[in-house]
Image: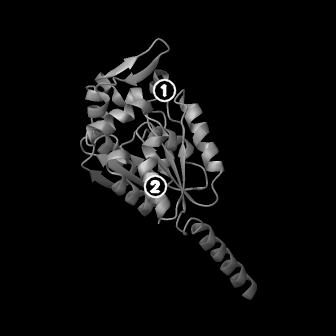
Amino acid sequence: MNKIVANLSAAALSLAVAGTAHAAPARNVVLVHGAFTDQTSWDKVAKLLRRKGFHVTEVANPMTSLEADVAATRAALAEQKGPTVLVGHSWGGVVIGEAGNDPKVSALVYVAAYAPDRGESLKSLSEGAPPSPGKKALGLDARGYLSLDPAAFPSLFVGDVPAAEGKALVAHQIPLNSAVFGEEATVAAWHDKPTFYAISANDQMIPPAAEAMFAKRMNARTVTLPSSHASPVSHPAEVAALIERAAR
């Protein structure tokens, strides 16, 4: 009898330890940028988090395919030591949903981001919906890559920062391979990870109603910011605070 009790106690202890594998606060943050910008769009948020003692990595997505962007994110995750919060803005939400099943990932944070379920694509998610003002301002080049009209970029992408700053961001625009719109999600890690979402109430790229739908469907802990699409640029303190919350 004593031996049985001892074995049961050991099993219970083992389960308790396994259940608290990510109980310690995460000190690593991996930031994944979205379409029509580069990793510098995260610089303000990264600076705030580093001041709080976080180890922050800003992924440089090639924007050539979902597979390539996921590979870049997984390479960044491989360099982390310990629990890591994985954050995606805009198109980056698709990327973190694919890469977020990494065992190091303790939480996912979506910032004005797409969050497809398995089998969904950006194309299927937008079918039947009127195009957003930002989508109407997209242009396709000869290679099949999309860019946002530079003249419309400041107002449509980040209309809540000084005009000079918005114009400066145009130089960081990276074209997006239009083929990604048809690529279907295969993982949807938000089913299995604690999830957080920052809705941009004044988004001109992704309809705020769509962002609210993603957040509700994921049962994400949600904040709504009076922000343009580029909330990491215009509301870095609020975005950093949500990431810090996810880290705890």
Q: Residues within 10 Å of mark 1 (few under 14, many from 20)?
A: some
How far apart, in angstroms, are the residues tagged by discs 1 and 2? 30 Å
Q: Is residue 129 visible?
A: no
Q: Is residue 149 visible?
A: yes
> In the displayed structure, would residue 175 be above or below residue 14?
above
Give how far across and how far down residue 10 sits, in percent.
69, 78
Amino acid beneath label 2:
Lys
Which residue is outermost to the bottom? 2
Please indicate whether residue 131 sits to the left or right of residue 65 in the image.
left
Please indicate whether residue 113 sits to the left or right of residue 193 in the image.
left
Q: Nearer the viewer, residue 11 or 146?
A: 146
Q: Nearer the viewer, residue 53 or 164?
A: 164
N-terminal of the pair, mark 1 or mark 2, is 2
Which residue is outermost to the top? 142
> In the displayed structure, would residue 57 be above or below residue 151?
below
Amino acid beneath label 1:
Val
Q: Which mark is residue 180?
A: 1
Q: Nearer the viewer, residue 132 or 13?
A: 132
Q: Quadrant of residue 162?
A: top left
At x 62% / y 61%, what residue is drawn?
82
At x 50% / y 47%, what residue is drawn?
31
Q: Which mark is residue 47?
A: 2
Give how far across and how far down residue 33 sits, in percent.
46, 40
> In the displayed structure, would residue 158 be above or below residue 102?
above
